[in-house]
Image (cartoon, grey):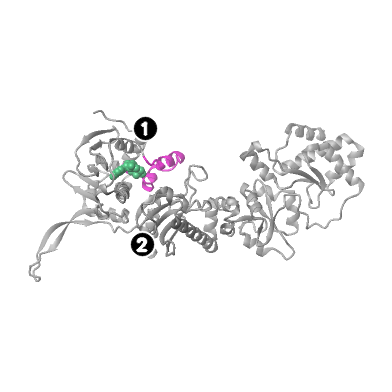
């Protein structure tokens, strides 16, 4: 039979493997054992409802055999197995190409690091082998198949004889050369150490025949005699890391587990383990918060969820019902003995125990984040830069149903503190005379700081929350208040309670306003004298419920809805530019019209909106300069 070539991307990964540096090579064993364990998980799951499997929990095992003469390592499992199609599609292409994707998107990242940090799977075996033979019989099939490859030049699949269901992988270990020694992988002590290092928690026994000296039973103890005996030994402790007590697990072990399980490049920013004895459900959880935003986070491709185990048996790889949307960044494992094992995945959604676990987890995560915020502000702010936006979704999603969960762990930039603050901190600083929580929306902290509207409040010493994210405005509108203090967007027109200016209502003023309104027509809803402008001549505020930030957001999110904020042009009667306009209404009407248009365009620019007719604006400026 002709050789089949590897698919092109697999070929590239294969090249990486074959040429990788030595120190990372040892992870091949961890990868193969983890595949074997996954395959056993699958068959064990079937065996719970299907008597034909004929295996009990204790029958499942992974075996490692070494043959120094033949230079082979053989890894045997009695898992689900593969048929010819599986062999072709699973081992001919990269099943989990997370690492390759990462590589494509981070081209500068070092190849070597990727191999060391990621689960690179089956292919890693080529780092230590000249030739790999996979012999497998799939559960439910009466034929067995063999897949053989010596790397770059492709693979061959043929029918073979194999009695038991499962997979056997034979690695032909490379010869040592000047720079690299492979022979140590044929030593039992080495393999046993690697299993302890990387695969200790695997839930099925990993067995290898070990030799040791055994005291001969009826010998004279003053002159002891020993026999060399060979006995199968279990190399791993089989206790999953989340079942171990926190004090017995090192940070290193948690990090290693996280990176391997969740394909991350960096250790997590936060690790928290919980053991919950509940009335409805008891469970153990081990949760992680990544230190970087996953590359596909904030896209539809990202799937939130936790791995769900029932008494150590994996039932779902990514159970999304376990974490709410606002904590979608949390990764981890949940193991409960109270979940029914043969429950279908559809039914699981409505399971009472599962719902109970999810709501307990939500509280645990909230508490963890609160104490992080309290005890390590700097660390929390780093986390917040990554996932703060996600938390804020909790303020708006589900009609605000989760506001109580997140309202004390979200942060906003403060105009007076010049850093991120909590709502609680803001309210604590509010003076007796301040009734509302002020916020201002805009494109960036810098742009907001320069808005004419913020000047007035700043001069009065008021603290303003600067909101540069689209979601902020929705968040405040949906919360309406915090600790009985209403939120007020000071960029909007209706914030005047603080001003005690006398009313300007003589006829001359009315004429001025009418003149400007006539010039601008439908572009503005209203023209008023401002009570808050100081150094700026004009500003634009929004009347009614829709703000400019919402208008900008909707223009992108739902352009067909044509959502527009109602524009109010506020003018500063004390400003020389406005005085010039007023003087010209009688002296030079044409000039006054130009001034009105100019000031309106300026107000648009400051508000971060686009000038409707930029070339008209430019012409106006030029004509006045002449
Ligand atoms: P990953 O394990 O990340 O999916 P691998 O390259 O390690 O990627 O393996 C590819 C696929 O080959 C696995 O997803 C699995 O379907 C199959 N496979 C690998 N090893 C075994 C095994 N021992 N028994 C059954 N299937 C296996």
How would you rate the neighbour count of disc 2 (Cα within 10 Å): few for under 14, some for 14-19, many for 20 or more? few
Q: Quadrant of ligand 1?
A: top left
How would you rate the neighbour count of disc 1 (Cα within 10 Å): few for under 14, some for 14-19, many for 20 or more? few
| Residue 622 shown left or right of residue 312 in the figure | right
SS at circle 1? helix
The chief SS type of the magenta part is helix
Picture quadrant where residue 4 is located: top left
| Magenta stretch holds residue 102 | yes
- The x and y percentages for residue 422 are 61, 59
Residue 580 seen: no
Where does the C terminus fall, quadrant-wise?
A: top right
Name the residue nearer the viewer: 25 or 328. Answer: 328
Sequence-earlier tag: 1 or 2: 1
Q: Residue at x 62, y 46 (%)?
A: 470
Q: Which mark is residue 244?
A: 2
View extreme (top): residue:
2
In the rendered view, tell whether residue 485 sits above or below residue 220.
above
- The x and y percentages for residue 272 are 44, 60
| Residue 23 shown left or right of residue 100 in the figure | left
- The x and y percentages for residue 270 are 46, 57
Residue on which disc 1 sits: 8
Q: Which mark is residue 618?
A: none
Highlighted range, magenta: 95-122
Q: Residue at x 71, y 41 (%)?
A: 564
| Residue 28 shown left or right of residue 208 in the figure | right
Residue 113 seen: yes
Name the residue nearer the viewer: 112 or 377. Answer: 377
In the rendered view, tell whether residue 586 sits above or below residue 227.
above
Picture quadrant where residue 370 is located: bottom right
SS at circle 2? loop
- The x and y percentages for residue 486 are 69, 58
| Magenta stretch holds residue 321 | no
């Amino acid at each position: 039979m002709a050789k089949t070539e590897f698919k092109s991307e697999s070929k590239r990964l294969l090249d990486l493997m074959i040429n990788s540096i030595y120190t990372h090579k040892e992870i091949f064993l961890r990868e193969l054992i983890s595949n074997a364990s996954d395959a056993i998980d699958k068959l064990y799951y079937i065996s719970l409802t299907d008597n034909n499997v004929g295996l009990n929990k204790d029958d499942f095992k992974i075996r490692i055999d070494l043959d120094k003469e033949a230079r082979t390592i053989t890894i045997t499992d009695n898992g689900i197995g593969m048929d010819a199609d599986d062999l072709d599609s699973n081992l001919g292409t990269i099943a989990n190409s997370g690492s390759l994707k990462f590589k494509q998107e981070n081209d500068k990242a070092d190849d070597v690091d990727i191999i060391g940090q990621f689960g690179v799977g089956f292919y890693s075996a080529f780092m230590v082998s000249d030739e790999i033979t996979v012999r497998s019989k799939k559960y439910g099939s009466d034929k067995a198949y063999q897949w053989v490859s010596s790397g770059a030049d492709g693979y061959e699949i043929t029918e073979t004889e194999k009695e038991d269901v499962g997979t056997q992988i034979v690695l032909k270990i490379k010869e040592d050369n000047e720079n690299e020694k492979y022979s140590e992988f044929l030593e039992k002590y080495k393999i046993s150490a690697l299993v302890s290092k990387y695969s200790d928690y695997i839930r099925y026994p990993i067995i290898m025949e070990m030799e040791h000296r055994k005291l001969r039973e009826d010998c004279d103890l003053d002159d002891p005699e020993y026999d060399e005996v060979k006995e199968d030994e279990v190399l791993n402790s089989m206790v999953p890391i989340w079942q171990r007590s926190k004090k017995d697990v090192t940070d290193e072990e948690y990090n290693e587990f996280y990176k391997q399980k969740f394909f991350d490049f960096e250790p997590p920013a936060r690790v928290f383990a919980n053991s919950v004895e509940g009335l409805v459900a008891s469970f153990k959880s081990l949760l992680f918060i990544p230190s970087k935003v996953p590359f596909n986070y904030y896209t539809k491709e990202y799937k939130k969820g936790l791995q769900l185990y029932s008494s150590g048996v994996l039932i779902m790889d990514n159970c999304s019902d376990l974490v709410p949307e606002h904590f979608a960044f949390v990764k981890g494992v949940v193991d409960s003995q109270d979940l029914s094992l043969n429950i279908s995945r559809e039914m699981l959604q409505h399971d009472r125990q599962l719902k109970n676990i999810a709501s307990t987890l939500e509280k645990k995560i909230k508490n963890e984040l609160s104490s992080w915020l309290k005890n390590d502000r700097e660390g929390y702010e780093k986390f917040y830069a990554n996932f703060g936006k996600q938390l804020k979704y909790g303020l708006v999603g589900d009609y605000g149903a989760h506001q109580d969960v997140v309202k004390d762990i979200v942060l906003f930039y403060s105009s007076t503190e010049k850093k991120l603050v909590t709502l609680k901190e803001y309210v604590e600083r509010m003076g007796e005379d301040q009734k509302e929580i002020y916020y201002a929306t805009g494109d960036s902290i810098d742009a907001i700081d320069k808005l004419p509207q913020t000047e007035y409040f700043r001069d009065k010493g008021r603290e303003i929350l600067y909101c540069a994210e689209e979601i902020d405005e929705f968040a405040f509108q949906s919360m309406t208040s915090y600790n009985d203090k209403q939120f007020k967007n000071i960029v909007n027109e209706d914030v005047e309670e603080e001003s005690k200016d006398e009313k300007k209502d003589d006829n001359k003023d009315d004429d001025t306003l009418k003149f400007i309104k006539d010039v601008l027509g439908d572009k503005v809803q209203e023209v008023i004298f401002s009570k808050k402008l100081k150094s700026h001549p004009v500003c634009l505020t929004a009347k009614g419920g829709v703000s400019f930030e919402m208008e900008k957001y909707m223009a992108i999110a739902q352009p067909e809805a044509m959502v527009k904020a109602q524009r109010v042009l506020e003018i500063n009667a004390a400003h020389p530019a406005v005085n010039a306009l007023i003087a010209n209404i009688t002296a030079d009407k044409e000039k006054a019209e130009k001034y009105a248009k100019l000031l309106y365009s300026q107000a648009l620019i400051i508000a971060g909106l686009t000038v409707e007719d930029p070339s008209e604006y430019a012409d106006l400026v030029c004509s006045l300069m002449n």
